[in-house]
């Protein structure tokens, strides 16, 4: 099944950086190395994309075209990369009203998508 990332959420990848997730070997387990995207997004955006968590989506546009992403939220194998507090920024609107924007740091597993063609 080819599930495409919803275009209305493409902005969460703005400013995302590619990182390598590395886990040391623990008793009975092998170490792993996985490519990922780390993004600092608003709490509001996180709440909008949370229903897409732990599902793999293909990306169709921009510099990430040909890749697939999976938002890490509760997977025990990736506990160290579960969403974390990303701080907050206090601002003043044009009307002079003070407001605060909360951020969260999330990780998306990043995979290359390999297409096969029938012979």
Image (cartoon, helix red, strand yellow):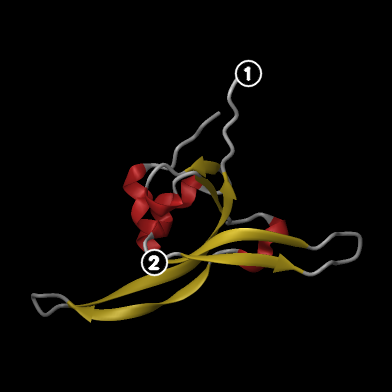
Disc 2 from disc 1: Cα separation: 40 Å
Residue 82 placement, left or right of 93: right
* SS for dot 2: loop
Q: Residue at x 51, y 42 (%)?
A: 57
Dot 2 corresponds to which residue? 15
Residue 119: mark in rendering: 1
User: 5 or 116: nearer the eye?
Assistant: 116
* 30 in relation to 66, above or below: below
Q: Residue at x 39, y 66 (%)?
A: 15
Viewer-nearest of labels 2 and 1? 1
Q: Residue at x 32, y 72 (%)?
A: 101
Residue 77 placement, left or right of 54: right
* 67 in relation to 45, above or below: above
Q: Which class describes the residues within 10 Å of circle 2: few (<14), some (14-19), or many (20+)?
A: few
Q: Residue furthest left?
A: 95
**Image location (x, y in percent) of residue 81:** 61, 65
Residue 43 placement, left or right of 20: left
Total tally of numbered discs in the picture: 2
**Image location (x, y in percent) of residue 61:** 38, 45
Q: Quadrant of the C terminus?
A: top right
Q: Which class describes the residues within 10 Å of circle 1: few (<14), some (14-19), or many (20+)?
A: few
């Amino acid at each position: 099944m080819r599930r495409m990332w919803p275009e209305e959420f493409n902005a969460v990848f703005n400013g995302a950086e590619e990182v390598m997730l590395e886990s040391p070997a623990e008793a009975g387990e092998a170490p792993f190395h996985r490519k990922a995207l780390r993004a600092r997004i608003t709490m509001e955006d996180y709440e909008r994309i949370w229903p897409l968590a732990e599902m793999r989506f293909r990306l169709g546009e921009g510099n990430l075209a040909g890749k697939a992403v999976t938002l890490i939220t509760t997977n025990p194998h990736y506990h160290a990369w579960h969403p974390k507090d990303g701080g907050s920024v206090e601002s003043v609107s044009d009307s002079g009203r003070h407001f605060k924007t909360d951020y969260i740091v999330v990780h998306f597993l990043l995979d290359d998508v390999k297409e096969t063609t029938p012979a």
